[in-house]
Image (cartoon, rainbow, N blue to C red):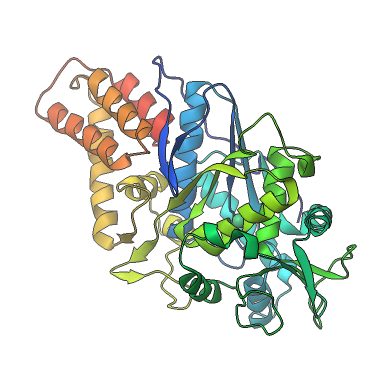
Amino acid sequence: MEILNSPWPNPSQPTLSRKLPILELRGTGGSFSVDPDTGLRMYVCGITPYDATHLGHAATYLTFDLINRYHRLIGKSVHFVENITDIDEPLLERARRDFTDWQSLAQKETDLFTEDMSALRTFAPDWFVPATQAMDLVDKAITAMDAHGFVYKLEGDLYFRTSSFLSELPYSVDESIAIFAERGGDPERVGKEHPLDSVLWISNRDDEPGWESSHGYGRPGWHIECAVISLRYLVGPDFIEGDSTRSALIDIQGGGSDLIFPHHFMSAIQVRAMTGQRFARGYVHTGMIGLNGEKMSKSKGNLVFVSKLLAAGVDPMVIRYALLKEHYSKDRMWTDSLLAEAQTDVLRIREALSRNEVAATEETIAQVIGAIGNDLDTSSAINAILDWVNRTESGGVGGSTGQMSRALDSILGLAF
Ligand code: ZN
């Protein structure tokens, strides 16, 4: 797969004739806002392309799309990078199961992902980078970490020494070990210096794809891939030198809440080990989407795919609206009634926007901006919009439908 610059066309974003306050985010590990004098450097962990985009992915990427939109409206430059984990165990497993080769599977699912993201009116990343195109970056990063004493070898594989960062774990050591085991880690492997040490370079196994590197033939671990891709494309080719003009190398690292540990923790400490600098100013994590009361997961076989909903004729703006109905940080359920309610709400909003006379819009737009500026409170924003619909349906006058539809589109990406 290739490195892609803006992999799908950006949606249009109408301008707003008002000043927006700085966006406050209550991230994992503390509140933060992006420095108003600098542009936004945002890295969002991308998909492992062995399956289509499900609603959990969509909810995550819509959240970061709101952050992106908001900063564009403030007039700041936005640098947004996303990776594609196009070499990983789940992808190889799925390719073996389906008697297909892992490259064509990755390409097919990535193409589907870009179509889904485009249909949902999300801004494309400036750089969309497959892990298979980051081998030289990983090589360089491991060399730098090794020079600082953070790397050791175990039966040909290279491990990162986590011991000096244990006091920063988001959970207790025992809890961390349990979560590490559940999420792809190998705490039980004999010979490791500490159970929480994570693999940087996996030496080649029989029949598995591999790459030449100065650390042997093999493939990288997952955490180091995101660390180097974010730095190379947000900081620059000399990323090992860091960037002393900033208190952290990037502004936001984001993804689903299942990435808090180990993935984001490991990426951050590996960046510190190679550059000596703090990685991200803030971390934003999105809640998990369940289905009808159950956790949505590939093992349960109950994933709801965006492409399937679209193929069944569901309006992408209804999907977007339904996913924005509650706050991004909440674990929440996708249900038939959520979809039905979203369809009804969208119909009512469209109907209100097609009237000649509508209730006053100025204050509603101010409420929407205020809500989104306050940690992307989409739930309050949508309540304000529905309140305006109610007032319009009851004969309210004095508003501008043009103003309202431009605001919904530019702030929330809801084009009605
Ligand atoms: Zn990642």
Q: Quadrant of residue 52?
A: bottom right
- Relative to 396, say whether 137 is above or below: below
The quadrant where residue 85 appears: bottom right
Say whether residue 208 is left or right of residue 29. right
At which x and y percent is residue 267? Answer: 63, 55
Quarter holding ligand 1: bottom right
Could you tell me residue 89's position as x and y percent?
66, 74
Along the line of sight, the residue nearer the viewer: 404 or 376: 376
Find residue 372 and report its horizontal and vertical position in percent.
36, 34
Task: Please say whether residue 202 is visible from this viewpoint.
Answer: no
Vertical position of residue 268 compared to residue 251: above or below: below
Q: Position of residue 60 (x, y in %)?
A: 46, 51
- Quarter holding residue 87: bottom right
Which residue is at 66% across, 63% downward?
222
Q: Is residue 231 above or below residue 371?
A: below
Residue at image point 42% right, 78% down: 300
Residue at the spot 40% in from the left edge and 16% down from the top edge: 19
Of 98 and 195, nearer the camera is 195
